[in-house]
Image (cartoon, coloured by chain):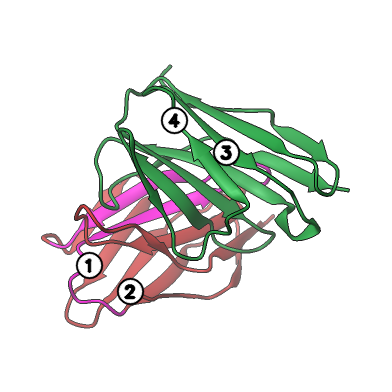
Chain colours: A green, B red
Amino acid sequence: DAMVIQNPRYQVTQFGKPVTLSCSQTLNHNVMYWYQQKSSQAPKLLFHYYDKDFNNEADTPDNFQSRRPNTSFCFLDIRSPGLGDAAMYLCATSPEIGGGEQYFGPGTRLTVT
Amino acid sequence: GENVEQHPSTLSVQEGDSAVIKCTYSDSASNYFPWYKQELGKGPQLIIDIRSNVGEKKDQRIAVTLNKTAKHFSLHITETQPEDSAVYFCAASKRNRDDKIIFGKGTRLHILP
């Protein structure tokens, strides 16, 4: 089945220790998104790629970086995680740019100790 | 920018009864309105969407209605079942290159036995 896969599902890191979350997709979609979701809140968009074009939301902290080496994979790097970065990180894909239907992965739950 | 208001924040209904969740949006240029269901520990799943050129769309037990004049849209779930218990997010977008989907804050739906 075509899908969006995120690894790991649960990640524990220490305060200030860099961490990388990964996302892969078999849908062959051009657009990939990274969202941060905190408890009882809506997903908050961090950035997105349209093919290799990278778009950063204005309020995404510099601490968050992303890489998309090819169509299938996208990575979220958190350079120096703080306690406030503990959240669910969601990857999503879309066949078209500009707020069309999005398909989410299961998420990675990040804990910062 | 677009703002999406969602009500209620929590909804409890008896199994077998209907549930209605309402959203309003601010930007009259928005033309795409998806609904996502998020179960505990999972990513949001697109369950139904509607474009601004139609007023109603139905898929089995779920339906969405759109009133462009009033700028509001609603999700209707009939004959609710225990597996309908989840958080539901409405969203809106303009589906152009520079746009993104704007989520409501979510409704936690409890189906009571």
Q: Amino acid at mark 4?
A: Arg
Q: Nearer the viewer, residue B63 or A58?
A: A58
Circle 3 marks a residue in which chain? A
Q: Name which quarter of the figure residue B64 lies in.
A: bottom left
Give how far apart the Cα atoms at labels 3 and 2 are.
Answer: 27 Å
Q: Nearer the viewer, residue A96 or B19?
A: A96
Does residue B83 appear in the picture of this structure? no
Identity of the residue drawn at 39% across and 22% down: A70
Q: Nearer the viewer, residue A52 or B112?
A: A52
Identity of the residue drawn at 19% across and 55% down: B96
Identity of the residue drawn at 46% across and 68% down: B104
Magenta residues, start to end: B26-52
Image location of residue B110, percent across then percent down: 64, 60
Crowdedness near tag 2: few (<14), some (14–19) or many (≥20) residues, C-alpha within 10 Å: some
> Can you say whether A30 is above or below A98 in the image?
above
The residue to which callout 1 is attached is B30
Circle 2 marks a residue in which chain? B
